[in-house]
Image (cartoon, rainbow, N blue to C red):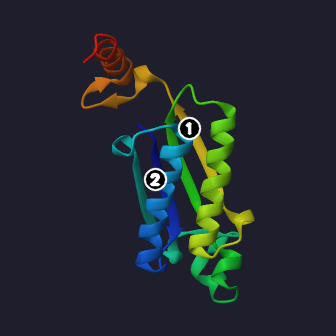
Amino acid sequence: MPVANLHVLAGHPRESLKQWVRETSRALSEILAAPLDRLEVWVTEIDPDLWGISGVPASEVLAKTPRHQAEMPFIRMVLMEGRTTEQLHRVIGELSAITARLLDVDQERIRLHIEHAHPDRWGIGGVPASIRRAAELATRKAGG
């Protein structure tokens, strides 16, 4: 169920962005013990004319400052309630490190926000996660 939207200025090499998706997915799967088929990770590229840095369009900032010093990637995630503080801190640290390495950006400029979803307020296939989870647990308990 974990989802992550990776926001970045347009212009990075496509292979770097694809690797960002791969490594972010693997890290989330490992840290959260979440099956890869339940993860959704996607990149949103933002036009530098439409992203503000220091109160002006990023395109103007990038005309004077190297990208790796100016860019501020933003990662927005939604996780089901119940993750430990240790898991959340690992996600923040590891995803920030992955982002800094793959995008050649100063890690201090990366922002990451984790929102929690209550199982009654998160739907999967038209069914609240609380009901779907209960059905999955019952099936496992019955040996199926």
Which element type, helix, strand or loop, lies under badge 1?
strand
Judging depth in this view, the residue of 62 and 40 nearest the camera is: 40
Q: Quadrant of residue 64?
A: bottom right
Q: Which residue is mark 2?
A: 25
Q: Residue at horizontal 63%, vertical 76%?
A: 104
Residue 137: give x, y in percent of width and height. Answer: 36, 16
Q: Residue at horizontal 54%, vertical 27%?
A: 81
How dense is the environment of label 2, judged by Cα within 10 Å: few (below 14), some, or many (20 and up)?
Answer: many
Q: How many marks?
A: 2
Farthest residue toward the front? 143
Check disc 2 and give the amino acid type: Ser
Could one spot residue 72 in this view of the protein? no
Taking the image as shown, residue 128 lies to the left or right of residue 105, namely: left
* Quadrant of the frame with the N terminus: top left
Check disc 1 and give the amino acid type: Glu
How dense is the environment of label 1, judged by Cα within 10 Å: few (below 14), some, or many (20 and up)?
Answer: few
Residue 53: give x, y in percent of width and height. Answer: 66, 70
Q: Which residue is mark 1?
A: 115
Q: CA distance from mark 1 to mark 2?
A: 17 Å
Residue 31: give x, y in percent of width and height. Answer: 56, 43
Which element type, helix, strand or loop, lies under badge 2?
helix
Judging depth in this view, the residue of 55 and 87 nearest the camera is: 87
Q: Quadrant of residue 21?
A: bottom left
Which numbered disc, 1 or 2, marks the residue closer to the eye?
Answer: 2
Q: Residue at horizontal 63%, vertical 73%?
A: 71
Of callouts 1 and 2, which one flags the residue occurring earlier in the amino acid sequence? 2
Any mark on residue 84, and which? none
Judging depth in this view, the residue of 79 and 86 nearest the camera is: 86
Residue 108: give x, y in percent of width and height. Answer: 75, 64
Could one spot residue 104 in this view of the protein? yes
Taking the image as shown, residue 87 lies to the left or right of residue 122, namely: right
Taking the image as shown, residue 85 lies to the left or right of residue 31, namely: right
